[in-house]
């Protein structure tokens, strides 16, 4: 049942089309006045969804392969954390804290004594 263009004629005709791709379960539903154009529109919608799914699967596999080859390349391993608000620098390797002012003034020997 629909309202808008077509009125009673739209409610009397059975021209709606639902196309389902059996292997993937993707489907498209088109409800217009002409069954022939509805079939074409529904088929083109299903085809475009299948293409988008294939591209997404391909990109997902590519990303998985790339990540398995290069890993995280050392990202995520912190050496030092600078917290200027609390005036401290934390060396993550030895879990020691230092004053930010000392480190910024070049007193790195404090850090390297503990490493």
Image (spheres, rainbow, N blue to C red):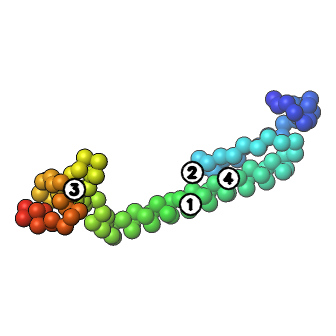
Q: Which residue is mark 3?
A: 100
Mark 1 or mark 2, whichever is nearer to me: 1
Q: Is residue 96 left or right of residue 52?
A: left
Q: CA distance from mark 4 to mark 3?
A: 60 Å
Q: CA distance from mark 1 to mark 3?
A: 52 Å
- The answer to whether the residue labelled 2 contacts the one labelled 3, judged by CB atoms less than 8 Å apart, is no
Front residue of 22/39: it is 39
| Badge number at residue 54 | 1
Residue at x 67%, y 57% (from the top left corner): 48
Contact? badges 1 and 2 (CB < 8 Å): no
Q: Secondary structure at mark 1?
A: helix
Q: CA distance from mark 1 to mark 4?
A: 12 Å
N-terminal of the pair, mark 4 or mark 2, is: 2
- Element class at badge 4: helix
Q: Is residue 57 visible?
A: yes
Identify residue for label 4: 46
Query: Which residue shows up at 15% across the image and 65% down it?
Result: 107
Q: SS at mark 3? A: helix
Of residues 18 and 10, the one drawn nearer to the viewer in this rendering: 10
């Amino acid at each position: 049942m629909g309202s808008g263009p077509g009125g009673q004629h739209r409610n009397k005709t059975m021209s709606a089309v639902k196309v389902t791709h059996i292997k993937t379960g993707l489907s498209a539903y088109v409800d217009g006045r002409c069954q022939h154009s509805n079939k074409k529109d529904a088929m083109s919608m299903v085809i475009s969804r299948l293409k988008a799914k294939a591209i997404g699967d391909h990109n997902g596999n590519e990303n998985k392969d790339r990540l398995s080859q290069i890993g995280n390349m050392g990202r995520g391993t912190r050496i030092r954390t600078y917290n200027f608000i609390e005036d401290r620098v934390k060396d993550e390797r030895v879990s020691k804290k230092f004053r930010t002012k000392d480190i910024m003034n070049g007193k790195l020997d404090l850090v390297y004594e503990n490493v």
